[in-house]
Amino acid sequence: DAKTTQPNSMESNEEEPVHLPCNHSTISGTDYIHWYRQLPSQGPEYVIHGLTSNVNNRMASLAIAEDRKSSTLILHRATLRDAAVYYCILRVNAGNNRKLIWGLGTSLAVNP
Amino acid sequence: NAGVTQTPKFQVLKTGQSMTLQCAQDMNHNSMYWYRQDPGMGLRLIYYSASEGTTDKGEVPNGYNVSRLNKREFSLRLESAAPSQTSVYFCASSESKGRGRNEQYFGPGTRLTVT
């Protein structure tokens, strides 16, 4: 299965943009890129996903490289509530078996 | 609309004891999942159920059994608990809208300690 690589930790200041990188060099053509985040002592929460084109939603933006070997999650204005572990995940499609391949994530600290 | 609920929130077992972790969702989702999360590791899929009446093994199924009781409920059973099963267990559900979508909604987790 293809895997993702993310920095262990990153730091940001409140109200500044945050760019969280992810490498997935062995991604296959049908794998979707998903991002989830996990706040302390909570279950993971869906953030955004995409296949080839850049995507925007109310939480974040997802920029996908043209060769799809990397992507970047963009939080436009970080708040203290955005401090969490962010997971870049590949959704592998294999027939009827669709599963998420989780990595270790990036722990984001937001400074006031 | 409670989303995904899990019981219990915490549990301590002795080696060899059995227990069942309960999970229920009220979003009318077809698919449900059980994951475990250990320190320094990502979530690992134990079992999943693509639809009512079907279950399949995930990445780490040994030592566990599951039951998809109905569309709402998906339980995880440890028949003979071992210290290696000390972990945080998460249940999740998804609608399976089609290729690429399928965002998963997670419960709050069960913290299990096996001594």
Image (tube, grey):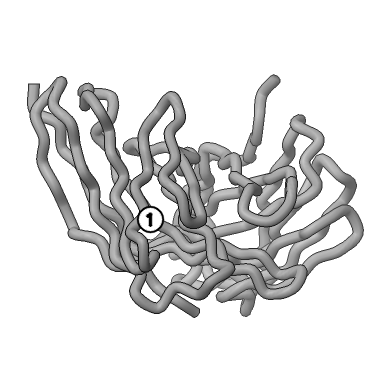
Q: Position of residue A29 (x, y in %)?
A: 53, 71
Residue A82 shows in the view:
yes
Residue type of the residue flagged with mark 1: Cys
Give me the residue at 37% from left, 44% from top: A62
B98 in relation to A30, above or below: above
Q: Identify the subunit bearing mark 1.
A: A
Q: Which residue is mark 1?
A: A88
B108 in relation to B76, above or below: above
Q: Is residue A64 left or right of residue A99?
A: left
Give me the residue at 18% from left, 58% from top: A8
Split into 4 quadrants, where in the image is the C terminus of chain B? bottom left
Q: Nearer the viewer, residue A22 or A42?
A: A22
Give me the residue at 50% from left, 79% from top: A1
Q: Position of residue B60 (x, y in %)?
A: 57, 75
Q: Position of residue A96 (x, y in %)?
A: 76, 68
B14 in relation to A60, above or below: below
Q: Nearer the viewer, residue A108 or A50?
A: A50
Split into 4 quadrants, where in the image is the N terminus of chain B? top right
Residue at far front of view: A66
Q: Nearer the viewer, residue A79 or A28?
A: A28
Q: Position of residue A18 (x, y in %)?
A: 19, 37
How many marks on residues? 1
Indicate the secondary structure of the residue bearing disc 1.
strand
Give me the residue at 59% from left, 40% from top: B105
Q: Is residue A100 left or right of residue B101?
A: left
